[in-house]
Image: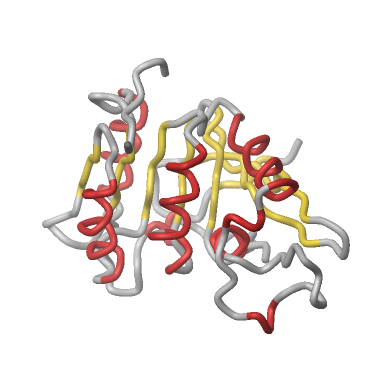
Amino acid sequence: MIINEFDTRRLHYINGKCGSAILENDISPPPELVEFQNIISKFSNFKSVVHKQYCNLHPKHLEELNGLIKDKNVKNILIDSLFKDRKQFRYIISNVFSSYTKLNFFINSHGSLLNVLQDELDNYMDMYEVRNPYYTHGGNEKPYFNDLTFTFFRNNVYEMDGDIMKHIYIEAGYHKCVARYGKDYKFISHPYHVEDDDNIQTNSKSKWD
């Protein structure tokens, strides 16, 4: 298995800002995500680094998060979730993540995201808006270019597995879309060097009721 070194220049915008946000459904994020957020902050060229943590995640948090991303203060999103709350998953995809490109998502889901994503692709594509009909799949009733697929086509999504990050992408075929693992990366806390681009096109949970 080839493990690539993560190019840490991807962590910040061209303006040098390297902000991050943790999204957590519990009263506090897990220590490993907090530690990783601290490591990310070290790569910022700014003394004042945006370092947000949204616990007991609620829609009221999304306006602030949208503003931080839009103003290019936050590029890295850290999520700890098993993605059992599909309503929440769809809401945040449609109301935040599908509006941006080149964000980094570092997901701590113990591998559950890939299965959830495939189930959404197979059975719930009609839950996501198609903003530009030009990109629909030849008039098929299940277009492959919607808010869900756009989020994965145009951003970088990684499943955290210990000290290895597994890239997750969507492969769009003629009949269906398939969620796959791509390259494996190791995040090393030292000055970056260039790698090939791989940007392929808890029991206590908060409720949003």
Picture coordinates of residue 122, whole percent (x, y): 75, 47
Instruction: Determine the residue located farthest toward the front in the rendered image.
Output: 209
Picture coordinates of residue 203, whole percent (x, y): 40, 15
Picture coordinates of residue 142, whole percent (x, y): 75, 62
Display coloring: secondary structure
Residue 140 in which image quadrant: bottom right
Instruction: Determine the residue located farthest toward the right in the rendered image.
Output: 175
Q: Residue at x 61, y 66 (%)?
A: 146
Q: Is residue 193 left or right of residue 206?
A: right
Q: Residue at x 32, y 38 (%)?
A: 208
Residue 189 in which image quadrant: top left
> Nearest the camera: 154 or 150?
150
Q: Is residue 178 left or right of residue 71?
A: right
> Nearest the camera: 152 or 2?
152
Q: Residue at x 47, y 34 (%)?
A: 85
With respect to residue 60, does 173 lie above or below? below
Q: Residue at x 33, y 31 (%)?
A: 207
Picture coordinates of residue 201, whole percent (x, y): 67, 66
